[in-house]
């Protein structure tokens, strides 16, 4: 469904350090910075990118927005969360753990990146 997702960051080097770490937990190689100063993480299932806002305004997280990353296990989701916190992110919502809901049993771990973008590491039980 999606070709790519791009988030904003005021300092792409800070964001790259954060995303190299958390996406590395998922087995994604370190991002590559293009000539325009954007960083791209390319996988067989899509592209995740980070850029300074092109309109010159400060980067901000989308109010109500969440970007979910699929994890192979609950341990991977928790490692994503913990790595994010260790690299400048902020733990948010309930602590990482199992939840029951309309989608069945899922393990969720929420963290905000250094620029306020809300991320969710998700493992389906």
Image (spheres, rainbow, N blue to C red):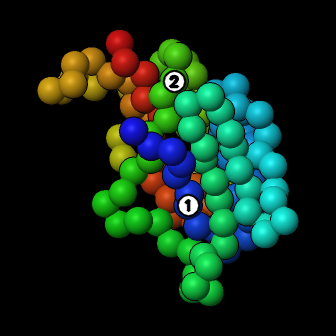
Direction from residue 16 to residue 58 in the image, left or right: left
Residue that sits furthest to the left in the current view: 102
Between residue 52 and residue 120, name the one nearer to us.
52
Instruction: Determine whether 65 is above or below 63 in the image.
Output: above
Q: Residue at x 65, y 59 (%)?
A: 50
Q: Nearer the viewer, mark 1 or mark 2?
A: 1
- Could you tell me how far apart the alpha carbons at marks 1 and 2 are, in whole angstroms? 20 Å
Dot 2 corresponds to which residue? 71
| Image position, residue 68 (x, y; %) | 44, 40
Q: Position of residue 76 (x, y in %)?
A: 57, 22
Q: How many marks?
A: 2
Circle 1 SS class: strand
Per the image, the residue denoted by label 1 is: 7
Residue under the point 47% across and 66% down: 61
Instruction: Reply above or below: 26 against 14.
Output: above
Query: Tag on residue 78?
Result: none
Q: Quadrant of the N terminus?
A: top left
Q: Is residue 95 visible?
A: no
């Amino acid at each position: 469904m999606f070709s790519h997702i791009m988030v904003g960051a005021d300092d792409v080097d800070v964001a790259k350090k954060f995303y190299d770490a958390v996406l590395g937990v998922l087995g994604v190689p370190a991002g590559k910075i293009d000539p325009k100063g954007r960083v791209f993480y390319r996988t067989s299932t899509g592209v995740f990118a980070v850029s300074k806002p092109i309109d010159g305004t400060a980067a901000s997280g989308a109010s109500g927005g969440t970007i979910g990353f699929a994890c192979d296990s609950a341990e991977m989701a928790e490692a994503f969360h913990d790595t994010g916190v260790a690299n400048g992110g902020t733990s948010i919502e309930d602590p990482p753990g199992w939840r029951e809901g309309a989608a069945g049993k899922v393990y969720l771990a929420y963290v905000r990146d250094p620029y306020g973008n809300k991320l969710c590491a998700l493992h389906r039980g």
